[in-house]
């Protein structure tokens, strides 16, 4: 029987993880993730969760012990943030190459420096090319539901890739909301048998070399290397369909139908669209509603799955609008705009005509993006639709 | 015609050592050992002990059938080689069989050399001591005899003389040279040995030559000496030295001087033919020329080198040359000699006489010979010092005053 | 596989000529001593004369009576008193005075190793005589399955390859093996391009996370009840003491049940011989070169095994391929301990290429490193504390060891003094930890 509770996002993640029955959980505390691992430790201590808890000496080892466990056959879970992710980067980089179907929550936080412990998506955006699947949650319920879905996707034989389930630090991690906890039996039957190391394992009963040296200037090396790399790309490609299927399956079993790749909000006749990601989307939708009341034909596209990037879905959703405003919680240095904005631009290239788009950056370092901010963004995007070009991104909290 | 890769003629020390060396480098090559003897391999050196009864004939055997089976070598007894066709690569046997080989080792050793003395042409019965059969027949004859004459005061002669004396016979030894065991010991050392024989009732006729032997009644005989003297005997043993068994090679093209001439890897002048042991005339360590040194250590060493070379063993190092060695027991006492121990005028000689007698010969600060009576020493260590030409100038005092300790020290230091 | 036998070893530097061995032998054999200690070249130096139980015994070859033969089981050259005719030819065969006349019996006498329990060794108070059982180890394990491909591409004379092969031969197939980046996988143990180099499951961890990955593997196998798998690393010193240290320390602190073998070749040899924190003072490496302004490494090596002791591991030990029987005994204990907690074995491993020593001298370097106390052999357990497994008494001077190694060729007197002083300090500290009284010199 499902149960309704009022919990914060970190506890929602802990529940999502616990219900997915990982064999091993490795943790190292970091703000704003710390309470998440405390919940897990408590669950295990109370016997509500049957997993090995490894509280190791740093995030580098967090992921490393999970690598070992996964290669031995364990389902694994962890969570981290910003600096933790940075410290984890070496094994993190390796995870998709080994095709290890792990799930790690990223409690998004802005990255040092300037020293900062508050929300922002700079951490996730910095590792977007590594080969992990990234899904972003909008609310506590979605966090709880997305973690089992993430396992289902990760362990799909055609995917076999690690998944980061992102939820925003502060706003979601500490924010409390009503959450309906899925029934364990439902999650069990949804997930089925775990499938983690059929392809690569460290087991004396199936001896093999895991990760021999591959490459070199001549011989079988370069071709073998290319085969692995292309394999990873096909895993990513396959994930798009699998993510859709998994969400649909989850919806059938729980009655909660989350948009798997992107969510289109009031886009049917929209002339101007906002693009959002993560928890900001709630306020953004309110701003869209307000604009609609004012008679303006506003719509919104929320990106749930950021990796693999749903190029076709994004391009199609935005093909009919006259202007687009993309709101980011991170910065793409070099392009000096929002990273999601860049991604959207790349997707739009697939359309026959050029849609004007502009970048908004807000919510850095724990700042709120309010309905007010979104209304400003909508105004500016409308002016873009009217022909007022925008070269620089708009920094939403600049004048707060 | 029988065929084999390695054919070894002879079954004594040189032959057995060659077998071992070949098998070390070639596990599978077919191998055959032919010997004219009817027994399994044994050492001629054991024979005095067979004569004395200390060693039973069956216990004198060095290798049995199991050994040959385990080493993949066919052992053929009663097989006397009578001819070699080096072009056809075959060895002919007395019984008409013949063997084809890829590589041949001649290890037919030596046989007693009978001096050209009237009466020793077969008309007078006499004993020799080279084979087990010889030893057993001598042992049999010993029981019935009372007076024995031994021709030759070398190792074989003296061993036998002691056996006969211990068995209660009246024994006379005739030696052409002024002292017994010439070549191994100097006069002082030999003197001690001679005294022992005399004490045990053995009559020594030193510096005497036999001019004739006759046996009118066909049983006992008279040995006539160059000084007109005559010795009566009912047992005669001829031990006047040995000569290599190389007569069967005549006409084969193998170069023979006093023995079969070999180079430093025991090759003869013919391809695929090697020789080792008493039959071979190989390099002498001291002189560098080819000489006969009929002792076990050289037979073993030469057999090893020949075997290695035959099997193409890359660890082969050329022969350094033979060094004479004698370890001699007489009436429970010990006489030892190595190298140029009896020589005079070849270096600096240090003698020491007390309870025992010791003679050390040095040349250029290096040991060249060492002999002792009644004072055992490490023959092998002295042999190494000689062969390695170890410079003793830094420790000469020590060496001369405490040769045993110093020798052991040098070997321990040098070869840990 | 060939054969090897146990043997009585003599360390001349430790012998004080007391002669107790000879007395013990004479008593045990009721005759002349078969072992003889003689004065050496200098004051207070001694040498040994004893049967070496040769592989190709000349004494036996020249024996006409079949009285001498090498025993196939023990390797001892047995003398058969009944067969012997006392001709003494054997004494001409021996180059070391190993068989000689016993004046009590007027017969030859030689060492028979007291059937594996030599009286002389037991009587030796200085450790100059030692009963070395490496031969038994070799015989016991020589025929075991080699767990690596034949053609590993280690440098000629590679000691690490020796360690790998020995260790895995002993541990067998029920193992999971981590070989972090370094010479060990570099020579092909994890294989190339989809092919493996090892018969047990093997992997490249990152240089930095070996102990952590192993911990994860072990925890999972324990969780599912497969508790008999040896989960282990053959790691280099760099990945252990430098950038992988956090993982080692963390796993040790948590008591992860893992066997961690550190093969210490004193630097980053695989990448071209750069310094690591275990590179000793004065050592040439490609990043501590020798020039006008630099004379090799200017810092001392980190003593990693001691640091592991501070972690209170289930087992910590040091070992050297120079002393195989010690190494094997410790491997046994280390494997056993790895089922109870973190088990750390530090094996010192000279690198012929990086240390600039001829490949033929590697084992000699191993032995001299120990004999000079540059390397000390000890083990630690929580119950028993720290204990030397080889006495550090009467070491040879550090200079004798150092001159064997090309990487120290440039050292000046001050540097040599520094090394000697550090070695002495280290031993003094270990002695304190081992609660052993300092031996009177
Ligand atoms: C009584 C006695 C005491 C000795 N004492 C000592 C001693 O104390 N120390 C020492 O070092 N040496 C001693 N020797 C010498 C030593 O025995 C020899 O040097 C040694 O045996 C030489 O070995 P070999 O293999 O060369 O030949 P041999 O031992 O002579 O053996 C020759 C082999 O060839 C075989 N053979 C000969 N002709 C033929 C043929 N035509 N066809 C087939 N086979 C043939 C024989 O049957 C025999 O097997 C002694 C010798 C004797 C006789």
Image (cartoon, rainbow, N blue to C red):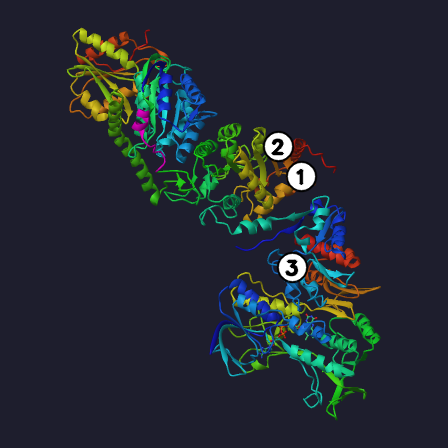
Mark toward the viewer: 1 or 3: 3
* Circle 1: element type: loop
Q: Given this view, does label 3 or label 2 mark the residue nearer the observer?
A: 2
Indicate the quadrant where residue C67 lies.
bottom right
Q: Where, by quadrant of the figure, is residue A382 drawn?
A: top left
Q: Give the range drawn in magenta.
A: A185-198
Picture quadrant where residue B378 is located: bottom right
Callout 1: few (<14), some (14-19), or many (20+) C-alpha neighbours within 10 Å? Answer: many
Question: In x, y percent, where is residue A352?
Answer: 15, 24
Q: Mark 2 or mark 1, which is nearer the start of the sequence?
A: 2
**Above or below C117: residue B257:** below
**Is label 1 in contact with label 2 (beta carbons under 8 Å)?**
no
Q: Name the residue under label 1.
A: C392
- Asked whether B313 or A270 is in front, the reply is A270
Which of the image's four quarters has the C terminus of chain A? Answer: top left
Q: Is residue A366 in sight in this rendering? A: yes
Q: In the shown orientation, is residue A311 left or right of residue C203? A: left
User: In this rendering, does residue A332 appear at all?
Assistant: no
Which residue is most to the front? A1
Label 2: how many Cα within 10 Å (few below 14, some 14–19, many 20+): few
Quadrant into which the N terminus of chain A falls: top left
The subunit carrying tag 2 is C
Residue identified by numbered label 2: C383
Crowding near the residue tagged with mark 3, few <14, some 14–19, many ≥20 C-alpha atoms within 10 Å? many
Look at mark 3 in the image and give the residue it sits on: C77
Tell me the distance, in whole angstroms, between the alpha carbons under discs 1 and 3: 33 Å
Q: Of marks 3 and 2, which one's residue comes earlier in the chain?
A: 3
Residue C209 part of the magenta segment: no
Q: What element carries label 3?
A: strand
């Amino acid at each position: 029987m499902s149960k309704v509770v009022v919990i914060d996002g970190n506890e929602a993640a802990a529940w999502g993880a616990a219900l997915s029955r990982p064999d091993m959980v490795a943790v190292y505390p970091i703000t704003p993730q710390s309470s998440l691992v405390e919940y897990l430790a408590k669950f295990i201590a109370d016997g509500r969760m049957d997993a090995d808890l490894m509280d190791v000496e740093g995030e580098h080892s967090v992921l490393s012990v999970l690598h070992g466990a996964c290669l031995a056959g364990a389902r694994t879970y962890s969570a981290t943030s910003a600096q933790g992710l940075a410290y984890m980067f070496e094994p993190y980089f390796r995870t998709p190459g080994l095709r290890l179907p792990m799930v790690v929550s990223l409690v998004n936080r802005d990255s040092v420096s300037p020293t900062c412990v508050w929300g922002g998506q700079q951490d996730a955006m910095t590792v977007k090319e590594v080969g992990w699947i990234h899904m972003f949650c909008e609310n506590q319920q979605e966090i709880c539901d997305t973690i089992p879905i993430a396992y289902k996707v990760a362990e799909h034989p055609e995917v076999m890739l690690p998944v980061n389930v992102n939820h925003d630090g502060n706003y979601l991690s500490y924010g409390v909301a009503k959450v309906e906890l899925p029934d364990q039996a439902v999650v069990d039957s949804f997930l089925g048998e775990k499938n983690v190391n059929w392809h690569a394992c460290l087991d004396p009963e199936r001896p093999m070399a895991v990760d021999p040296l591959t490459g070199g200037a001549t011989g079988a090396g370069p071709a073998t290397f290319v085969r692995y790399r292309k394999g990873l790309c096909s895993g990513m490609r396959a994930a798009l369909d699998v993510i859709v299927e998994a969400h649909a399956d989850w919806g059938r079993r729980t009655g909660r139908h989350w948009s798997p790749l992107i969510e289109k909000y009031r886009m049917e006749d929209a002339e101007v669209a906002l693009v959002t990601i993560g928890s900001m989307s709630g306020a953004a939708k309110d701003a869209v509603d307000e604009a609609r009341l004012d008679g303006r034909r506003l719509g919104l596209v929320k990106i749930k799955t950021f990796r693999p990037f749903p190029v076709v879905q994004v391009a199609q959703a935005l093909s009919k609008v006259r202007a687009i405003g993309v709101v980011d919680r991170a910065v793409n240095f070099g392009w000096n705009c929002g990273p999601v904005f860049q991604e959207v631009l790349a997707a739009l290239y697939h359309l026959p005509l050029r849609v004007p788009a502009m970048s908004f950056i807000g919510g850095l370092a724990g700042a709120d993006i309010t309905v007010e901010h979104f209304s400003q963004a909508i105004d500016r995007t409308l002016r873009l639709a009217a022909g007022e070009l925008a070269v620089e991104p708009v920094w939403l909290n600049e004048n707060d | 015609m029988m065929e084999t890769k390695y054919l070894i003629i002879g079954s004594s020390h040189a032959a057995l050592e060659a077998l071992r060396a070949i098998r070390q480098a070639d596990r599978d090559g077919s191998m055959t050992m032919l010997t004219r003897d009817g027994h399994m391999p044994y050492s001629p050196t054991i024979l005095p002990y067979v004569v004395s009864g200390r060693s039973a004939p069956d216990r004198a055997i060095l290798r049995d059938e199991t050994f040959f089976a385990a080493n993949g070598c066919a052992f053929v007894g009663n097989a006397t080689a009578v001819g070699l066709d080096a072009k056809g690569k075959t060895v002919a046997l007395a019984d008409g069989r013949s063997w084809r080989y890829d590589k041949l080792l001649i290890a037919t050793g030596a046989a007693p050399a009978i001096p050209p003395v009237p009466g020793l042409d077969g008309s007078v019965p006499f004993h020799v001591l080279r084979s087990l059969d010889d030893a057993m027949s001598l042992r049999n004859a010993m029981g019935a005899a009372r007076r024995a004459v031994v021709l030759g005061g070398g190792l074989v002669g003296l061993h036998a003389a002691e056996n006969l004396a211990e068995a209660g016979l009246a024994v006379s030894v005739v030696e052409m040279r002024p002292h017994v065991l010439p070549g191994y010991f100097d006069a002082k050392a030999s003197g001690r040995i001679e005294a022992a024989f005399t004490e045990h009732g053995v009559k020594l006729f030193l510096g005497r030559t036999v001019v004739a032997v006759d046996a009118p009644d066909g049983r006992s005989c008279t040995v006539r000496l160059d000084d007109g003297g005559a010795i009566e005997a009912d047992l005669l043993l001829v031990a006047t030295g040995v000569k290599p068994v190389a007569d069967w090679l005549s006409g084969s093209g193998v170069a023979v001087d006093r023995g079969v001439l070999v180079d430093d890897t025991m090759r003869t002048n013919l391809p695929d033919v090697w020789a080792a042991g008493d039959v071979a005339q190989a390099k002498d360590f001291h002189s560098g020329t080819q000489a006969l040194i009929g002792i076990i250590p050289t037979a073993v060493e030469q057999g090893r080198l020949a075997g290695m070379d035959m099997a193409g063993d890359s660890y082969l190092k050329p022969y350094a040359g033979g060094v004479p060695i004698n370890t001699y027991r007489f009436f429970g006492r010990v006489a030892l000699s190595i190298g140029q121990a009896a020589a005079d005028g070849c270096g600096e000689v240090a003698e020491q006489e007390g309870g025992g007698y010791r003679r050390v010969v040095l040349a250029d600060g290096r040991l060249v010979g060492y002999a002792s009576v009644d004072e055992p020493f490490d023959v092998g260590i002295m042999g190494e010092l000689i062969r390695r030409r170890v410079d003793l100038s830094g420790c000469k005092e020590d060496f001369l005053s405490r040769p045993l300790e110093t020798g052991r020290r040098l070997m321990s230091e040098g070869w840990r | 596989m060939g054969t090897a036998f146990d043997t009585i070893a003599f360390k001349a530097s430790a012998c004080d000529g007391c002669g107790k061995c000879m007395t013990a032998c004479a008593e045990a054999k009721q005759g002349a001593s078969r072992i003889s200690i003689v004065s050496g070249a200098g004051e207070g130096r001694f040498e040994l004369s004893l049967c070496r139980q040769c592989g190709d015994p000349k004494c036996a070859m020249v024996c006409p009576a079949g009285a001498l033969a090498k025993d196939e089981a023990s390797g001892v050259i047995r003398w058969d008193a009944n067969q012997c005719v006392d001709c003494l030819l054997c004494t001409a065969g021996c180059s070391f005075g190993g068989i000689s006349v016993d004046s009590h019996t007027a017969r030859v006498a030689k060492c028979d190793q007291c059937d594996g329990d030599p009286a002389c060794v037991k009587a030796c108070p200085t450790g100059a005589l030692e009963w070395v059982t490496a031969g038994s180890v070799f015989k016991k394990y020589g025929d075991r399955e080699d767990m690596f491909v034949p053609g590993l591409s280690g440098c000629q004379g590679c000691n690490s390859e020796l360690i790998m092969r020995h260790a895995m031969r002993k541990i067998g197939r029920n193992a999971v093996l981590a070989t972090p980046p370094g010479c060990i996988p570099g020579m092909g143990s994890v294989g190339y391009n989809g092919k493996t180099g090892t018969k047990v499951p093997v992997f490249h961890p990152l240089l930095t996370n070996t102990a952590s990955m192993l911990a994860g593997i072990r925890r999972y196998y324990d969780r599912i009840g497969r508790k008999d798998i040896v989960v282990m690393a053959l790691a280099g010193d760099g990945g252990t003491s430098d950038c992988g240290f956090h993982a080692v320390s963390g796993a040790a602190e948590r008591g992860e049940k893992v066997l961690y073998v550190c093969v210490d070749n004193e630097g980053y040899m695989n990448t071209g011989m750069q310094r690591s924190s275990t590179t000793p003072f004065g050592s040439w490496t490609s990043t501590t070169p020798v020039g006008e302004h630099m004379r090799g490494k200017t810092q001392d090596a980190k003593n990693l095994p001691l640091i592991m002791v501070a972690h209170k591991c289930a087992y910590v030990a040091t070992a050297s391929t120079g002393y195989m029987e010690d190494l094997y005994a410790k491997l046994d204990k280390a494997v056993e301990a790895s089922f109870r907690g973190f088990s750390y074995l530090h094996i010192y491993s000279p690198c012929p290429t990086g240390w600039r020593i001829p490949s033929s001298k590697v084992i000699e370097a191993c032995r001299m490193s120990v004999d000079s106390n540059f390397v000390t052999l000890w083990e630690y357990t929580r119950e028993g504390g720290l204990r030397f497994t080889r006495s550090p008494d009467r070491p040879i001077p550090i200079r004798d060891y150092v001159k064997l190694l090309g990487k120290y060729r440039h050292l000046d007197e001050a540097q040599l003094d520094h090394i000697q002083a550090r070695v002495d300090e280290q031993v003094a500290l270990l002695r304190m930890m081992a609660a052993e009284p300092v031996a009177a010199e």
